[in-house]
Every structure is written in structure tokens, then in C-alpha cells.
Image (cartoon, rainbow, N blue to C red):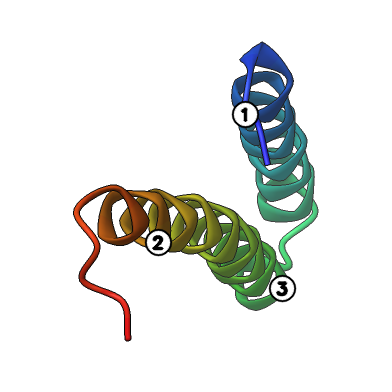
Amino acid sequence: MIYDANTIFQIAGIGIVVAMLHTVLKQMGKEDWAHWVTVIGFVVVLYMVATIVDDLFQKIRSIFLFHQ
């Protein structure tokens, strides 16, 4: 799978949306919900990055013939 600028823009978009939701919820006095939105956004981005890193390691493994 080829990763290009779209992945970077997706991660940035998630960050912007999460930041806006966090701010709105905090202004409404729903700090608990704001923190949960931030945690969920972080987990989603972490999953995306982990998938990309896993793909990178699989490609490195196949290049150096470490797979069995």
C-alpha cells in the first residue's frame, strides 16, 4: 500500500476535528466528554500510524529476506 500526502492530511484533519470538539465540549462544561473525545481521537491516529509502521516493517523484512 502506498502512503502519500492523503494519510498526512487525514491525520491532520482528525487532529483539527478533535481539537474543535474538545474546545466546544470544554466550553459547555462537559470536560469528561472532552477528554474522552481526545482519547478516542488519539487511539484512532495511533492505530493509523501503527498500521503504516507495520507495513513498513513488512516491506523491510521482505527486502532483506527475513521472512520464512
Which tag is nearer the camera, tag 3 or tag 2? 2
Distance from the alpha carbon under mark 1 to that under mark 2: 14 Å
Q: Picture quarter containing residue 15?
A: top right
Q: Is residue 26 left or right of residue 68?
A: right
Dot 3 and dot 2 residues touching (CB under 8 Å): no
Residue matched to label 3: 33
Element assignment for label 1: loop
In the displayed structure, would residue 44 be above or below residue 63? Answer: below
Q: Percent from the top left, x then y, of residue 1?
A: 68, 42
Looking at the rendered structure, the kind of residue marked 2 is Gln
Image quadrant in which the C terminus is located: bottom left
Q: Is residue 12 left or right of residue 68?
A: right
Q: Residues within 10 Å of mark 3 (few under 14, many from 20)?
A: some
Q: Residues within 10 Å of mark 2 (few under 14, many from 20)?
A: few
Looking at the rendered structure, the kind of residue marked 1 is Tyr
Between 5 and 12, which is closer to the camera in this rendering? Answer: 5
Residue matched to label 2: 58
Which residue extends farthest bottom? 68
Element assignment for label 3: helix
Residue shown at 20%/71% (left/top)?
A: 66
Residue matched to label 1: 3
Labels 1 and 3: the sequence-earlier one: 1
Q: Residues within 10 Å of mark 1 (few under 14, many from 20)?
A: few
Residue 35, disc: none
Q: Percent from the top left, x then y, of residue 34?
A: 66, 62
Residue shown at 56%/66% (left/top)?
A: 47
Distance from the alpha carbon under mark 1 to that under mark 3: 32 Å
Q: Percent from the top left, x then y, of residue 6?
A: 74, 20
Dot 1 and dot 2 residues touching (CB under 8 Å): no
Labels 1 and 2: the sequence-earlier one: 1
Distance from the alpha carbon under mark 3 to that under mark 2: 37 Å
